[in-house]
Amino acid sequence: MAPDLAETRESLWRLIFAPLVWAAHFLLSYVSGAIVCAKSAGDGVGTLHLLVACYTLLALALIVASAHRHWHRYRAGLPQRAAGGGEARHRFLGFAGLLLCALSAVAVLYTAAVPALVAGCR
């Protein structure tokens, strides 16, 4: 029973990885915006855009890597049409992880759009 419990914990960490990446991107983007606007008195918008672009590229790369892993997990369970058991659970977690990766990628893009549209600090 202990190996199954450890594997479940690992599956759950993999499942929430993409939303955690989005949360870190959100936090870094807005904290960087606050710091840049406070330190530069409105002149550092270019720096803010560069920082948010770097954060966005890194976050999207991590989410794509996670989606790739979930895709393989989902595809590994396709030949078996089991009604229950470990294979069905792995396939479901792979599909749920893919959906969370897609949602997190959209959230990262929306989060990046806000600082990109800011013309200046006020």
Image (cartoon, rainbow, N blue to C red):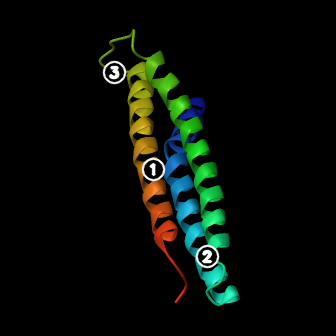
The reply to whether callout 1 and callout 3 are in contact (CB within 8 Å) is: no
* Amino acid tagged 2: Val
Tell me where residue 67 appears, x and y as whole percent: 51, 35
Q: Looking at the image, which is closer to me, 82 or 93?
A: 93
Which of discs 1 and 3 lies nearer the camera? The answer is: 1
Q: Position of residue 38 (x, y in %)?
A: 64, 88
Q: Residue visible at 39% across and 14% down?
A: 78
Q: Secondary structure at mark 2?
A: helix
Secondary structure under tag 1 reads helix
Question: Given contact means CB atoms under 8 Å apart, are the residues at marks 3 and 2 in contact?
Answer: no
Q: CA distance from mark 1 to mark 2?
A: 25 Å
- Residue 42, by quadrant, is bottom right
Name which residue type carries label 3: Gly
Q: Earlier in the sequence, mark 1 or mark 3?
A: 3
The residue depicted at 45 percent of the width and 50 percent of the height is 104
Instruction: Please state the horizontal and vertical placement of residue 64, each as a whole percent of the image.
Output: 55, 38
User: What residue sits right under mark 3 in the picture?
Assistant: 84
- Observer-nearest of 121 and 63: 121
How far apart in space, not on screen, are marks 3 and 2 (Cα)?
54 Å
Q: Position of residue 70 (x, y in %)?
A: 50, 31
Question: Residue at label 1?
Answer: 104
Disc 1 to disc 3, C-alpha distance: 28 Å
Asked if residue 45 lies left or right of residue 114, the reply is: right
Q: Is residue 19 above or below residue 46?
A: above
Q: Can you identify the residue that label 2 sits on?
A: 45
Amino acid type assigned to the residue bearing label 1 in the image: Ser
Along the line of sight, the residue nearer the viewer: 77 or 61: 61
- Residue furthest top in the image: 79
